[in-house]
Image: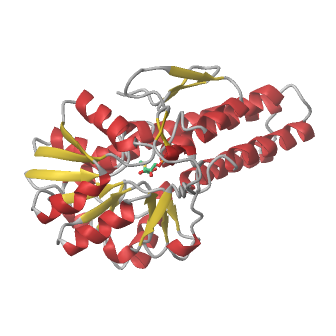
Amino acid sequence: MLPTIEWNGDAAVMIDQRKLPSAEVYVTCRTAPEVARAIRSMVIRGAPAIGVAAAMGIALGVRRSRATGTKRFAAEFQKTCDLMAATRPTAVNLFWAIDRMKRMFAAAAQAGCSVAEIAQRLEAEALRIHDEDVASCRSMGAHGATLVPESATILTHCNAGALATAGYGTALGVIRAAVEGGKKVAVLADETRPFLQGARLTAWELVRDGIDTTVITDNMAAALMRQGEVDLVVVGADRIAANGDVANKIGTYGLAVLAKEHGIPFYVAAPISTFDLGTRDGSRIPIEERHAREVTHVGPTRVTPVGARVRNPAFDVTPARYVTAIVTERGIARPPYDVSLARLAGGRHGAATPESSLP
Ligand code: MRU
């Protein structure tokens, strides 16, 4: 399986996603600030993957301070959590992972563990978050594959694959599971300006797996849908509000509107850790505005004139009414999402069949 992020005992090792597909380079992060820099600079990206990275970053941070006294150790732990939380604002998986590490810290401290034991438990928790993410992607894939016809052309946006998770992927997990189940699947990968996650990462992953892949520029989706060349859309998510509004890579909203206009199912695949049920609707989701250079340049080449202002919101919000279903590791949620998402998050496990659709 693709090594997105691994723990080598002393460091978090990540494939440098900025360099793909031209070069397979690995970055070794030995400290929490190194992990934070890797997240901020997009060495590692994708909602579940940055959650895993943050957890490993915290585990690295406490290693450094485990020789200190308990009070200082707790303060350093909090500082490291804050450092991780300040890396990227939209993907809620990041905050979910940090919360899990905080809960583990509190439980270990409560149990009277020594500083060294707390550090050990935090490392184990980070590895659990990693392994659980792979398992939940596989389960999501099994559920989502039931939505894919025997033969289908699937449009996807950004990269919601192995590279965006600890492995296998969310949206690409659904595609992989459909292919593994013997379905005849062709993928249209949206280029995904400005950072080109679709052209660079999704296409790289899928070609590597021998899956039929065609890259299109973002502005081609409408025409292809109109010509009947798209059977369904499946994307990932960075945060899903209680009412089913979905924040995902900029451009997702447009695709969802187009899919509705053309009568094409629009599916979102995301783990429960992407749910933010404390946020009522998408208008309250913070949207990251990234550096203008991602828009003004393609690689080293400037493509806009000096003096033109630039906007670079990295995500948009798709209102729930455009979302046909949300695929999770626990089953498939259908509208009304305020009911079905709460039920899934409450721990009801479904089977990998269409009957598991909720409510
Ligand atoms: O800015 P990125 O590359 O981190 O954005 C990633 C996305 O928008 C993905 O679609 C989302 O995180 C889902 S990943 C399984």
Q: Give residue 246's quadrant in the image.
A: bottom left
Q: Judge whether 114 appears above or below 195 on screen.
A: above
Q: Dividing the image into 4 quarters, which one contains the C terminus?
A: bottom left
Residue 77 x/y as whole percent: 79, 41
Q: Judge whether 253 appears above or below 293 on screen.
A: below
Closer to the camera in the image, 64 or 310? 310
Residue 122 in sight here:
no
Residue 170 x/y as whole percent: 36, 48
Question: How many marks overall?
Answer: 0
Residue 272 x/y as whole percent: 46, 58
Closer to the camera in the image, 295 or 57? 295
Q: Residue at left 76%, top 33%?
A: 62
Residue 282 x/y as whole percent: 51, 72
Q: Dividing the image into 4 quarters, which one contains the N terminus?
A: top left
Closer to the camera in the image, 320 or 191? 191
Residue 243 in sight here:
yes
Q: Judge whether 101 appears above or below 234 on screen.
A: above
225 horizontally vs 266: left or right: left
Q: Residue at left 79%, top 26%?
A: 64
Q: Residue at left 91%, top 41%?
A: 71
281 horizontally vs 330: left or right: right
User: What coloring was used for the rendering?
Assistant: secondary structure
